Image (cartoon, grey):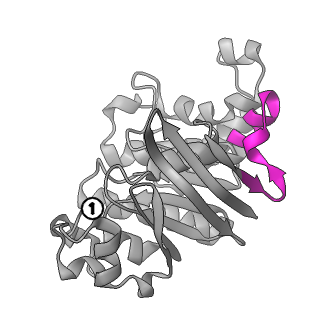
Amino acid sequence: MLKINNLTKKFGSNIAVNSVSIEVEKPIMLGIIGASGAGKSTLLRMINRLETETSGSIYYEGIPISDLKGAEKSRWQSDCAMVFQQFNLVPRMDVVSNVLHGTLNKRSTFTTFFNLYPRSDIDNAIEILGRLGVEEQAAKRAELLSGGQQQRVAIARALMQDPKIILADEPIASLDPMNAQIVMETLRRIHDEDGRTIITNLHTLDTARKYCDRLIGMRTGNVVFDGTPSELTTDIAREVYGADSSFSEAATSSTEIGELSSVSV
C-alpha cells in the first residue's frame, strides 16, 4: 500500500530525515513519536509532497509518489490530506466554507474564484460536520470557535477530499486535554468506520499507545523503533527521546488522556 524507501531530507548540512524506510501494508492508525526536531513533521510533509526529498522514494499502491508533478501531484495531495497543528483555517470565513475548501483541488479556477459550490458539496460538508459533532457551528466564523472545534473543522475539511490517507501533524499540540481527547477519538473513529489510514505525529506517549495500532519512534531523523504500543517499553522510550529526557514511568503506561500533562515530552 504505502512504501517509503530510504527517504532522506537535507536542509543544507542538516539531515532532517535520514534514510527512513517504512511499509504500511493495510489501513491502520500509525503514530510517529519523538522529540521536537526528530524529523516527524518533515517526514509527513514529504509524504504529502509539501517537501521534496533529497533522496529515496515513496510509493502508494505501486505508484511512485515522489515522481508526481502537476495535476497528478495535486490528485495525490487530495488523496493524502493534511491536518495541521495550527488548523490552517480562514479565520473570518464561515465554518462550512472552510470545509468546502477541501474540494479546491477538484474544482475549476472560475468556480473557486467566485466561491461557487454545488448543492451536493454543501450537503456533504454539513453532513461531515454533523458526524464530527460541530454541525451547529456551520454558519459561524471559524475564529469564533474553540481550538478543539477548529481542529474538528480542519478534519472535516480533510474528509471533504475523500482521502485514502489522512496525515495529522501534531493535531493536539495546541489543545487542552479534554479537546485533545475529542480530536484523537475523532481520528480513531474515522479510521475504524471508514477504513482510512491515519498517520499522526504525537508528543505524548500515552496518547500514542491509547489510539494507535503501530508506533514509529524517530530520533535525530532516524527510525529507532517500529512496533506495537505494547512493545514500547520504558527503555525503548528512553532510546527514542534520549536517556536524559525528563519523562516519567507513567509515560509508557495506560493512563487517561486528562492526566497527560505530566508525561508529555
Whether residue 191 sits left or right of residue 146 in the image: it is: right
Look at the picture and state if 252 lies above or below 144. below
Q: Which residue range is magenta in the image?
A: 58-77
In front: 37, or 164?
Answer: 37
**Residue shown at the point (61%, 71%) measured from the top left:** 28
What's the residue at 68%, 58% (across, down)? 5
* Relative vertical location of residue 79 with respect to residue 120 in this rendering, above or below: below
Q: Quadrant of residue 184?
A: bottom left
**Residue 1, percent from left and from top:** 76, 64
Q: Is residue 177 left or right of residue 128?
A: left
Q: Is residue 115 magenta?
A: no
Disc 1: CA contacts within 10 A as few (<14), some (14-19) or many (>=20): few
Image position, residue 54 (x, y; %): 61, 40
Residue sitting nearer the eye, 76 or 100: 76
Using residue 199 as the reference point, say whether residue 1 is left or right of it: right
Task: Report x, y in % for residue 63.
Answer: 83, 51
Residue located at (34% from left, 38% from top): 145
Count of numbered tags: 1
Which residue is tagged 1?
178
In the rendered image, which quarter is residue 260 located in? bottom left
Residue lying farthest to the front in this orientation: 13
Answer whether residue 156 is visible to the viewer in this image: no
Q: What secondary structure is marked by label 1?
A: helix
> Which residue sits at x=71%, y=36%?
121
